[in-house]
Amino acid sequence: MFHISDRMTDTTVASLLEGRDAAGAGVLANVRFGTYGAGPTLAGGAVELPIHMTHGRQHEFTETWSAAQAVTTGRYEELVYAHDDERLFCAGYIPASGGYARDAERAYSHIFELTDQLGFPDLFRMWNYLGSINDPNESGMETYRDFCVGRAEAFAFHGKDMPAATGAGSLGDGLSFYLLSGRMGSATHIENPHQVPAYRYPVRYGPKAPSFARATYLAQAGGNGESQRLFISGTASIIGHETQHVGDVEAQCYVALSNIDQLISAANLERHDVRIKRDDLRFDAVKVYVRRSTDIPLVASRCARYFDDRETSIAYLNVDICRSDLLVEIEAIAS
Ligand code: 3HB
């Protein structure tokens, strides 16, 4: 179960990983999108992860990942985790230093050790929020590219499939990350036929390509009434591997939404052997990353129309995006 709570109203606006009612279920984690960031902690039997993602307290919100069964928590190396019988939530924080490659490789290696040891080997969603994402590190490499090097090395070394992901800027320092992992065979990764898979991007975007899939389908968990979910990665104005409409936020928004359409089209789902009906899909937990605050009203009007904001929670975050010519990036959960 999952919900986003607006700090002011504390209403549940979306739900994920259904099992029991939100009121009765344990909580795996609270991810606080707010005015400061820090490393993850365990509090009240759940993971707490504050990430500096909002410019003011009025925009703060919390993503709550709830459990369907009893929750077990723990720590492993720099990671803090919580799991029930079916899902593992894991989080970490790497302080800013001259570069991220080594630390990211180490953290992702620890993630794979942990997920394998605990029996949740199938990563189905990850988020990485980097301070100064488009700025150079001490060797002159862009921070995002530097991070991609370490993450790619860990995925390659451990032979892991790449799940849906978001990689965006934060307003703080360091790398805040969290991810979800499931039992063996629970995840199916999906690509968009109109986009080159990110992990095959040419070297002009960085020495190691970004390690993620365009979406991941999470199959129904056995016997507890949980329903299926499609996790849509941060999606932007990229066709093939190239940014479209540099400088034009409205056109970028249109291409990003068209990319989501392509990804979840009946033909694409069928191509990936995912048996859910496009027409039955409902969106939840939409997060929209907007580089320039002045673009938010326009982006919000386009997204509200596409997602039907009467039905769906949409959070707008004014942060940088992994590629410096991208102005908007959109993620969602469809079920
Ligand atoms: C990532 O590097 O994990 C990533 C970056 C994006 C969108 C999705 C995933 O800009």
Image (tube, helix red, strand yellow):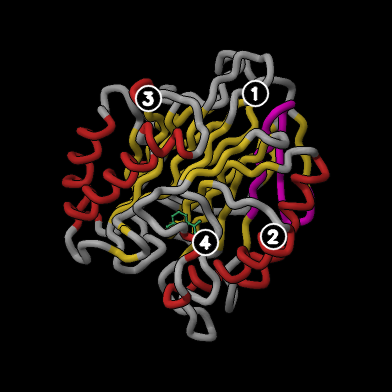
Residue at left offset 61%, top offset 37%: 187
- Point out the frontmost of discs 2 and 4: 4
Identify the element where label 1 is drawn. Answer: loop
| Residue under numbered circle 1 | 221
Instruction: Tell me the CA gap for discs 2 and 4.
Output: 19 Å
Identify the element where label 4 is drawn. Answer: helix
Crowding at dot 1, Cα within 10 Å, few <14 / some 14-19 / many 20+, comes out as some
- Amino acid type assigned to the residue bearing label 4 in the image: Tyr
Disc on res. 206: none
Q: Earlier in the sequence, mark 1 or mark 4?
A: 4
Residue at left offset 39%, top offset 50%: 193
| Residue under numbered circle 4 | 199
Viewer can see residue 44: no
Image quadrant assignment for residue 176: bottom right
Instruction: Tell me the CA gap for discs 2 and 1.
Output: 28 Å
Q: Which residues are magenta?
A: 76-92
Main secondary structure found in the magenta portion: strand
Residue 25 in the image: above or below residue 271 = above
Residue 230 in the image: above or below residue 95 = above
- Amino acid type assigned to the residue bearing label 3 in the image: Arg
- Point out the frontmost of discs 3 and 2: 3
Q: Position of residue 332 (x, y in %)?
A: 41, 38
Viewer can see residue 21: yes
Disc on res. 107: 2
Q: Nearer the viewer, residue 37 or 324?
A: 324
Instruction: Tell me the CA gap for discs 1 and 4.
Output: 28 Å
Q: Nearer the viewer, residue 49 or 2?
A: 2
Q: Is mark 3 within 8 Å of ligand 1?
A: no
- Amino acid type assigned to the residue bearing label 2 in the image: Ala
Residue at left offset 62%, top offset 40%: 180
- Point out the frontmost of discs 1 and 4: 4
